[in-house]
Image (cartoon, rainbow, N blue to C red):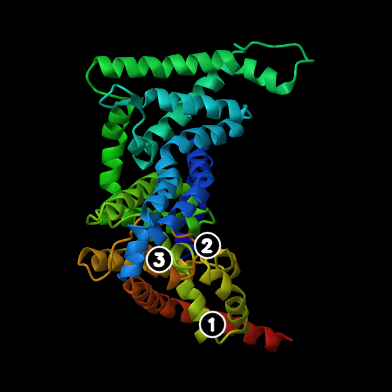
Amino acid sequence: MSKVQTFMEEKIAPFAGRIGQIKQLVAIRDGISFIMPLIIIGSVALILNSLPIEASWYLNLMNEGGWAERLGLIVNGTFGLIGLLASFTIAYSLANQYSLDGMSVGVLSLSAYLLSTPNIMSADNAAGLPLALMGSKGLFVAIVIGIVATEIFRFVIKRNLVIKLPDGVPPAVGKSFTALIPGFFIIVFFAAISWILDATGIGSLHDLVQTILGKPLSLLGGTIFGAIIYDLLISVFWLTGIHGGNIMGGIMNPIWMQKMDENRLALQAGQELPNIFTQPFFDIFVHMGGAGTVFALAICLILFSKSQQNKSIGRLSIMPSAFNIGEPLMFGVPVVLNPIMFIPFILAPIAMVILTYFAMATGLVPKTNGVSVPWTMPPLISGYLATGSIRGSIMQVVNLAVSVLIYYPFFRAMDKQFIREENKGEVDQ
C-alpha cells in the first residue's frame, strides 16, 4: 500500500495539478457554470410540461389552454441559448484569468459566434438564426470561438497594438477603444474562416468543428468504455487531493450536456430518448454523495461504526452527503490519500455506471429525460425528477445498496484500525 500511496503522491498528484491549472479547461468549466441557473430554470419548465398526468383536465389545460406552448417558450429561451451564451461566458472567464477586459472579450466572442453561424432563409427571403445552433448543438463551436477569440485578443494586447486615450476619458470609453484593434482582428479572422469554409463547400465552422471534435468525443462519451474511463480518472484525481470533477468536467461536461439536451428535444417531440450517458446520469445515479459514491461510506459510518472517531465523522457528514457534498468525508475520514479507501472509491462508481447503464439499456429504468436536476438534490427525489419515473428512485436505492456492500469490508478494516489506536491511547493514559 505504501508504494501505491507514494506513486499517487509523486506521480499522479503533480500531473493532476498541472491539468487542473490549464486556463482553457478552467474557462470551459466556469463558463458553463455561469449558465447553469438558466438550464435549471428551463428544467423546471420542462418538468411542468411533461408531468406523467393523463387526466383530461390536465391535458386540456396544457394543449387547449396553451400552457404547453408557453412553457415551451421558457425551455427554448433557456436551454435553447446554451451555445450562444457559452461563447460569451467562456471567453469572459478566460480573459479574466489573463487579466484582460472580460466584458469586451466576451462581447467580441459572441459576435464571432453569430458571424460563424449560417443564416436560415424563409420563403420570402427573410434571414434568421437557427435556434438549434444557438443551443447545445453549438456548444463545441462556442468553446473553440471563446478560446481562440481570447487568445487573439491577448496576442494583440501583448504587442501593444491598441488605441490609448488620455487619462481623463471615462474608463468605459477607454476600454472600448482599447478593444477596437483586437476586436478588428477577431472579427476579420472568423469572417475569413467563414468565407473559406463556404467557398470550399465544407459549410460552416459548426460543420467543421462537429466533424473534427464533436463526433469523436461524442462517440467516446456515448460508450460505456468512455463512461468508465471518465469516472476512473475522477476517482484517481480525488484520491490525490485534486478535485477530479473540476478537471474532467472541463473536458466531458460539454458532451454530457449536449446529450442531455438531445434527450430534452426528443422528449418534447414525443420521440424515443436517444442517450443513456448524460450529465444527470452521473450526477444522479453514480456520484451520490459526491465522487466515489461516498454517500455509501457515510451510511457505513452511521450504521456500523464502532470507533468513536468514525461515529463522529458519520454524524457530521451524513447530511452534507445526502445533498451530494462529499468534502467532509474526503478530508474528514479521510478518503484522500487513504490506501484502505483506494479500491472501493474507484470500484463503487464504476459499478454504478455499469449497473445503471444496463438497467437503462434494457428498459428496466427510463433514460434521463433531459431535465437538469440540481446536483445537490437528495437521492430518491432526484432519481424521480431525472427520469420522470419512480423506477429512477428505485435504481438509486439499488445503487446505494451495492455501494454499501462494496465499501463495507474496507470500512470495517479502517474501523478496526481506529479502534486499536483509540484503545492504545486509553492504555497510554
Image location (x, y in percent) of residue 152: 50, 20
Q: Earlier in the sequence, mark 1 or mark 2?
A: 1
Q: Which mark is residue 302?
A: 1
Image location (x, y in percent) of residue 128: 36, 28
To which quarter of the image does residue 333 belong?
A: bottom right
Q: Name the residue at 49% across, 79% down.
A: 299
Residue named by callout 3: 385
Q: Quadrant of the C terminus?
A: bottom right
Check the image and report above or below for 89 versus 279.
above
Image location (x, y in percent) of residue 353: 32, 63
**CA distance for labels 1 and 3:** 27 Å
Mark 1 surroundings within 10 Å by alpha-carbon count, few (fewer than 14), some (14 through 19), many (20 or more): some
**CA distance for labels 1 and 2:** 22 Å
Q: Nearer the viewer, residue 49 or 81?
A: 49
In the image, is 105 to the left or to the right of 177? Answer: left
Q: Which mark is residue 263?
A: none
In the image, is 200 to the left or to the right of 301? Answer: left
Front tag of 1 and 2 = 1
Q: Nearer the viewer, residue 412 or 323?
A: 323
Which amino acid is tagged 2? Answer: Leu
Image marks 2 and 3: residues in contact by CB distance under 8 Å: no
